């Protein structure tokens, strides 16, 4: 049986920001060496170019996360992750867009103004001690399970129908 190779990928994984507000021991971003030690944000121009190309094809899905924390993404004109998501849906014509976050950023609520389909929130601890051990802050300060929980609960209480939210917990 002959298999046909697609002309264009139907699923993309893009890392909007290759930095994180956490220094989790189980995450390779804490030890990974990138060319020239580059850390930063994907340029809007590059994202826009890719979305315009994807819009010409029948792309199904886009994951806007890899190792970095996607909610850290911003550009100089004030765009945030919700702009990327909406651009992927409107210009890239993606059927499904998903994001995974540690949930501990003040701008988590920006996702309410997006067309996000699926959100994974990784809490990784049900007690302060476990959470602080699993999800230490990158700046060396103590992690706060209560703060993260408050941000996530605020997000969930303001949520309408979308996105579908999944919680991921290591304990």
Image (cartoon, helix red, strand yellow):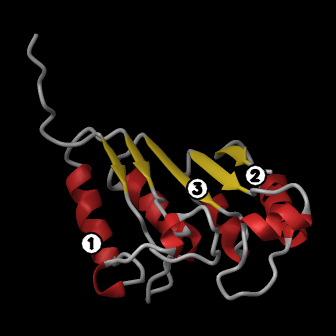
Pinpoint residue 147: horizontal percent, then vertical percent.
Answer: 86, 72
Q: Earlier in the sequence, mark 1 or mark 2?
A: 1
Classify 104 as above or below 162. below
Q: Is residue 11 left or right of residue 113?
A: left
Q: Are marks 2 and 3 in contact (CB under 8 Å)?
A: no
Mark nearer the viewer, 3 or 1: 3
- Residue identifier under label 2: 159
29 vs 20, nearest the viewer: 29
SS of the residue under disc 1: helix
Mark nearer the viewer, 2 or 3: 3
Circle number at residue 7: none
Classify 81 as above or below 21. above
Classify 48 as above or below 92. below
Could you tell me which residue is drawn at 90 percent across and 68 percent down?
Answer: 146
> CA–CA distance between discs 2 and 3?
16 Å
Could you tell me which residue is drawn at 71 percent across and 64 percent down?
Answer: 103
Say few, some or many: other residues with alpha carbon within 10 Å of mark 3 (under 14 / 14 to 19 / 20 or more): many
Pinpoint residue 136: horizontal percent, then vertical percent.
Answer: 73, 75
Pinpoint residue 69: horizontal percent, then vertical percent.
Answer: 56, 69
Say few, some or many: other residues with alpha carbon within 10 Å of mark 1 (under 14 / 14 to 19 / 20 or more): few
- Residue identifier under label 1: 46
- Residue identifier under label 3: 100
> CA–CA distance between discs 3 and 1?
21 Å
């Amino acid at each position: 049986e002959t298999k046909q190779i697609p002309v264009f990928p139907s699923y993309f994984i893009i890392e909007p920001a290759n930095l994180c507000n956490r220094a989790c021991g189980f995450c390779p971003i804490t030890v990974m060496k990138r060319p020239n030690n580059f850390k930063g944000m994907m340029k809007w121009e590059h994202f826009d170019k890719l979305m315009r190309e994807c819009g010409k094809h029948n792309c199904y899905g886009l994951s806007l996360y890899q190792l970095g924390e996607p909610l850290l993404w911003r550009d100089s004109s004030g765009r945030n992750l919700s702009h990327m998501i909406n651009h992927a849906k409107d210009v890239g014509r993606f059927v499904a867009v998903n994001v995974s976050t540690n949930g501990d950023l003040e701008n988590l609520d920006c996702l309410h103004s997006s067309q996000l389909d699926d959100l994974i929130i990784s809490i990784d601890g049900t007690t302060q001690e476990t959470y602080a051990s699993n999800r230490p802050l990158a700046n060396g300060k103590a992690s706060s399970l209560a703060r993260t929980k408050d941000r996530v609960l605020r997000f969930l209480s303001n949520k309408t129908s979308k996105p579908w939210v999944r919680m991921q917990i290591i304990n």
